[in-house]
C-alpha cells in the first residue's frame, strides 16, 4: 500500500501522505473506496493507528482539495496511468 504517482504528471514527487494536500495536487488525487477494497481499509486502519486523529484531518484536507473516492483498486489506479 502506498502512493502511486505518474512521473509524467507535472506534479512533484510526493514523499509522504501530507504532500498530497499541496496545491499541485488539487483535484488530482484519487483513492479507493474502503467498502470495496480491503487494501484501502487496511491503509485507513494503518494510518489511523500511526497518525491518530491527524489521519482523519489528512483525509478531510484531501477531500476538501478535490480527492475522488472511486470504487475498487483499478478505478483509482487507472486515472494515474
Image: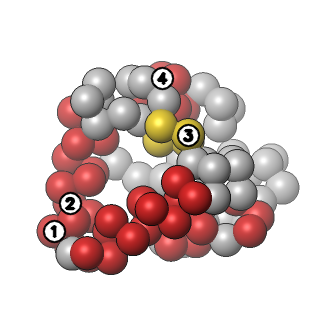
- Residue carrying label 4: 74
**SS class, disc 4:** helix
**SS class, disc 1:** helix
Gap between marks 1 and 4, in whole Å?
A: 26 Å
Q: In this rendering, which labeled residue sits more in front, label 1 or label 4?
A: 1
**SS class, disc 2:** helix
Give me the residue at 67% from left, 71% from top.
Answer: 22
Q: In this rendering, which labeled residue sits more in front, label 1 or label 3?
A: 3
Give percent across and percent down for residue 64: 58, 59
65 sits to left or right of 63: right
Disc marking residue 68: 3
Give yes or no for contact between labels 2 and 3 (Cβ–Cβ under 8 Å).
Answer: no
Disc on the earlier residue, 1 or 4: 1
52 sits to left or right of 1: left
Gap between marks 1 and 2, in whole Å?
A: 5 Å
Disc on the earlier residue, 4 or 2: 2
13 sits to left or right of 71: right
Specify few, some or many for label 2: CA neighbours under 10 Å numbering under 14, 14-19, or 20 or more.
few
Assign the C terminus to one quadrant of the image. top right
- Residue carrying label 1: 49
Q: Nearer the viewer, residue 1 or 48?
A: 48
Amino acid at each position: 500500500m502506498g502512493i502511486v504517482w505518474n512521473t509524467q504528471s507535472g506534479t512533484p514527487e510526493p514523499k509522504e501522505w501530507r504532500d498530497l494536500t499541496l496545491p499541485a495536487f488539487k483535484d488530482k488525487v484519487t483513492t479507493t473506496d474502503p467498502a470495496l477494497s480491503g487494501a484501502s481499509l487496511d491503509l485507513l486502519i494503518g494510518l489511523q493507528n500511526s497518525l491518530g486523529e491527524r489521519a482523519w484531518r489528512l483525509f478531510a484536507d484531501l477531500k476538501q482539495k478535490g480527492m475522488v473516492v472511486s470504487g475498487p483498486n483499478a478505478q483509482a489506479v487507472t486515472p494515474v496511468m
